[in-house]
Image: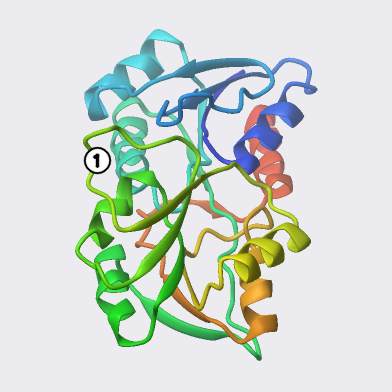
Amino acid sequence: MRVLILGGTGDAAELAARVAAIEGVEAITSLAGRTREPSIPLGDFRIGGFGGVAGLANYLRQMRIDLLIDATHPFATQISCNAVDAASEVGVPRLMLIRRPWQKVSGDRWIEVDTVEAAAKALPLQAQRVFLTVGRQELGTFANLKDIWFLMRIIDLPTPDAVMPPGLILCDRGPFALHHEREIIIHHKIDTIVSKNSGGDATYAKIIVARELGLQVVMVNRPAKPPGEQVMDVEEALAWLLDKCKQ
């Protein structure tokens, strides 16, 4: 049995490691290649795009993939949509592993918006020093906000010609400890955090610190996922895979 894991998340890496221990099942993890030094999962992997629906469908055929598990980032909508069409075309069973989103709790001061563009529009009303954690490709959306200082945490440096908001770039990769996030936020006198609702534990510490300090969080809600069978953790994904192996 051969399974293709569309990866790039911690859940995908954990799933690949767990599948590697199952006799008779081979996993191939696909990474988009958007970071220069991606975290390499256990087992076979590939890096780079497929070339749309047709390219992914061809790959499924050529590699004789039996099962497809989409464990990409909750905001990676294009590859998830491509997976729907490609799996349907080839006749490969497909599962989405989508970790639970963060939930607002007592003490949180969230402004919830549906897009990164809406997050940028919400900032001038109340923000002066912003911790921006939406990814390198989204930084240009905030470039016209010249009266706000940004601490921009990204994995890789932007290209020299990238349009950037004013502030400081911090290159780092999670998971991030609570004391680490508290130190950064206090040191840079942050008053607002902008984050995508990625879910999971790796980057949740900044939300805890915001709650402790009474800081505002502009939270970008997840886009709608395509239809299909979904699970929310690695254990459920493994149960689905093992059930398919028995059929």
Query: Helix, strand or loop at disc 1?
Result: loop
Of residues 85 and 151, the one drawn nearer to the viewer in this rendering: 151
Image quadrant holding the C terminus, namely top right
Corner quadrant of residue 105: bottom right
Pointer 1: residues within 10 angstroms few (<14), some, or many (20+)? few
> What residue appears at the point 40 percent right and 19 percent down from the top-left corner?
60
Q: Is residue 144 left or right of residue 189?
A: left
- Dot 1 corresponds to which residue? 162
How many numbered dots are placed on residues in this image? 1
Q: Position of residue 7 (x, y in %)?
A: 52, 34
Q: Residue at x 48, y 16 (%)?
A: 46
Residue 236 x %, y %? 69, 49
Q: Nearer the viewer, residue 50 or 196?
A: 196
148 left or right of 212?
left
Relative image position of residue 77 (x, y in whole percent): 34, 48
Seen at 38% across and 29% down, the residue is 91
Quadrant of the image containing the N terminus: top right
